[in-house]
Image (spheres, rainbow, N blue to C red):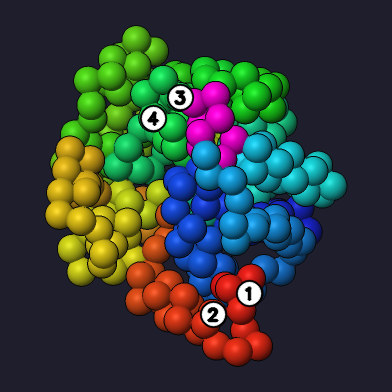
């Protein structure tokens, strides 16, 4: 579908509290600089450098995350866009955009979740809310967050691409809801399977969540798994991505050629060399950490 630039909102949300990692803030700001200039409206959500990171009712930085969620919803409502391109930040940045799009397009929209992880945890399992976001969009999870999901996404309208090595609790959650997964090997064997699935879903529109950690971390310093100062074994038991960037670009161009892409979020960009440079520059006189 061809739409005017004025009906597509670019939402820049350098949120880090959902993953409890301040580096996400700098990564999102760098990612926005790397993208072509927006030709339509842009809203940037102000995210503090520091906030209360303590756990409140099972979720770290609850107050900050809810305030940022409200700010994102207000920014979207101001424009009432037909489509939203979101620049993150941790994965929770996609809660407000997809909730808005799901309410707007109802059953005519499918969700394509391109990620190494299914993001269906809850606060009883993990205090970092960025790992809860897809469950929240289905209407499951903490009531303060799910209250913004006026029309929960139908689990049968969600297709995972790239998810692998799930934990038992994740596999059970997806199986109980008959949710679909096309893993890395299956995608390579039949790339057309994604478009075929989307068409079979009956949707004509699609919102895409693209978590960069779906990518193979080898040679990519901008992924969490390549954090330079991570202690040995820090990511043991955590699924890592197995796809290549070219495969994802080809996939999403193919999807956009067949369906109306009304949402695209790019999340979890962590260019560690630049992040460390940012920290060092913040020590300069007249710069200050508040400008990091």
- What's the mark number on residue 82? none
Is disc 2 placed on a helix, strand or loop? loop
Which comes sooner in the sequence, label 2 or label 1?
2
Q: CA distance from mark 2 to mark 4?
A: 32 Å
Q: Residue at x 48, y 65 (%)?
A: 27
Disc 4 vs disc 3: Cβ atoms closer than 8 Å? Answer: yes
| 164 shown above or below 169 | below
Range drawn in magenta: 55-62
Q: Which residue is mark 2?
A: 282
Q: Residue at x 82, y 49 (%)?
A: 79
Q: CA distance from mark 4 to mark 1?
A: 31 Å
Q: CA distance from mark 2 to mark 1?
A: 7 Å
Q: Nearest the camera: 44 or 102?
A: 44
Q: Can residue 5 be spotted in the picture?
A: no
Mark nearest the camera among 2 and 4 is 2
Mark nearest the camera among 3 and 2 is 2
Disc 2 vs disc 4: Cβ atoms closer than 8 Å? Answer: no
Q: Position of residue 110 (x, y in %)?
A: 52, 31
User: Callout 1: few (<14), some (14-19), or many (20+) C-alpha neighbours within 10 Å?
Assistant: few
- What's the mark number on residue 123? 3
User: Callout 3: few (<14), some (14-19), or many (20+) C-alpha neighbours within 10 Å?
Assistant: some
Q: Residue at x 53, y 44 (%)?
A: 53
User: Callout 2: few (<14), some (14-19), or many (20+) C-alpha neighbours within 10 Å?
Assistant: some
Is disc 3 placed on a helix, strand or loop? loop
Disc 2 vs disc 1: Cβ atoms closer than 8 Å? Answer: yes
Q: Which residue is mark 1?
A: 291
Q: CA distance from mark 3 to mark 2?
A: 34 Å
Q: CA distance from mark 1 to mark 3?
A: 32 Å
Which comes sooner in the sequence, label 4 or label 1?
4
- What's the mark number on residue 126? 4
């Amino acid at each position: 579908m061809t739409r005017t630039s004025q009906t597509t909102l670019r939402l820049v949300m350098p949120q880090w509290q959902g993953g409890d990692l301040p580096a996400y803030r700098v990564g999102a700001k760098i990612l926005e600089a790397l993208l072509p200039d927006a030709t339509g409206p842009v809203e940037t959500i102000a995210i503090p450098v520091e906030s209360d990171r303590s756990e409140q009712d099972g979720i770290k930085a609850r107050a900050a995350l809810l305030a940022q969620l409200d700010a994102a919803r207000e920014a979207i409502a101001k424009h009432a866009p037909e489509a939203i391109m979101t620049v993150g930040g941790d994965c929770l940045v996609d809660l407000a955009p997809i909730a808005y799009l799901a309410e707007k397009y109802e059953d005519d929209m499918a969700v394509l979740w391109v990620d190494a992880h299914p993001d269906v945890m809850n606060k009883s399992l993990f205090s970092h809310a960025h790992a809860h976001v897809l469950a929240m969009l289905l209407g499951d999870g903490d009531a303060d967050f799910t209250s913004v999901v006026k029309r929960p996404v139908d689990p049968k309208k969600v297709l995972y691409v790239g998810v692998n090595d799930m934990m038992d609790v994740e596999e059970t959650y997806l199986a109980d809801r008959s949710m679909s997964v096309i893993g890395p090997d299956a995608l390579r064997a039949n790339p057309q399977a994604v478009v075929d699935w989307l068409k079979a879903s009956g949707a004509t529109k699609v919102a895409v969540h693209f978590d960069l950690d779906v990518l193979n971390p080898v040679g990519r310093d901008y992924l969490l798994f390549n954090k330079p100062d991570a202690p040995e074994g820090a990511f043991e038991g955590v699924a890592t991505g197995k796809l290549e960037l070219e495969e994802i670009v080809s996939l999403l161009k193919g999807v956009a050629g067949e369906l109306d892409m009304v949402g695209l979020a790019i999340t979890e960009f962590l260019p560690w060399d630049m992040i460390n440079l940012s920290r060092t520059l913040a020590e300069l006189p007249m710069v200050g950490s508040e400008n990091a």
